[in-house]
Amino acid sequence: MGAVVLGMVWGRWFLPASLAGHLELVTNIALGLMLVGVGIELGSKRSTWSRLCVLGWRVLLVPLAVGIGSLAGAVGAGLMLNLPFNESSAIGAGFGWYSLSGVLIAQIYDVQVGALAFLTNVIRELMAFMLIPVLAVKMSKLMAVAPGGATTMDTTLPVISRATDADTTIIALVNGTSLSLLVPVLVPVLISL
């Protein structure tokens, strides 16, 4: 969280405007390097891959549970905020992938709801960065996968890798990949209800 606040301060008062256009490239390179590091760590542990084969189809129960929990939580919050079912469920179906879900909803339905989806999913990702290490220690390593949603295949994967073990990291990768595949399907379907 401190890094995000530092970035906001740096971007607001110290970053020259001429460099701002290069931030996306720098961020993508840094993320790519982190993911290569995670990949090297996973690839070096052959026992992890055999464990995934042993788990088989059951590994898909994690994204199923995370997806159902995300949608139920979003619909529940929507009821408390008097949001229509289609809006709250579509926002929840972003599963943390703010850059896609916000744009989809803005294009298909409404710009304001798209902005809400963007902010909701950004906040989910920020909370995931804080919750993953705590959940891994206080609850269980597998439970630490849930807050990241779709981001467990990319941005939160290094945090999960550091806070848990190789088995959980592989499960997180499967979780993130599965949920990411569902976002472009579920968001348009749910927002159109």
Image (spheres, grey):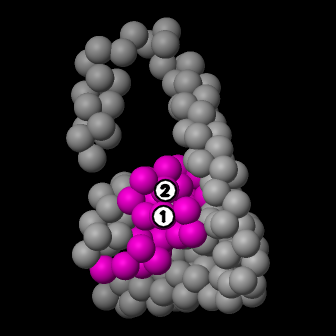
The numbered disc on residue 161 is 2
Mark toward the viewer: 2 or 1: 1
The residue drawn where x is 51% and y is 76% is 92
Q: Is residue 178 visible?
A: no
Looking at the rendered structure, the number of numbered marks drawn on it comes to: 2
The numbered disc on residue 165 is 1
| Residue 144 in the image: above or below residue 102 | below
In the visual, does 71 lie left or right of 105? left
Q: Is residue 159 magenta?
A: yes
Asked if marks 2 and 1 touch (Cβ < 8 Å), the reply is no
Task: State whether the magenta stretch is mostly helix, strand or loop.
Answer: helix
| Residue 43 in the image: above or below residue 62 | above
The image quarter in which residue 15 lies: top left
Residue sitting nearer the eye, 177 or 13: 177
The residue drawn where x is 26% and y is 31% is 6
Position in image of residue 143 (x %, y %):
42, 78
Q: Amino acid at mark 1?
A: Asp
Position in image of residue 70 (x %, y %):
49, 81
Give the magenta range. Answer: 139-168
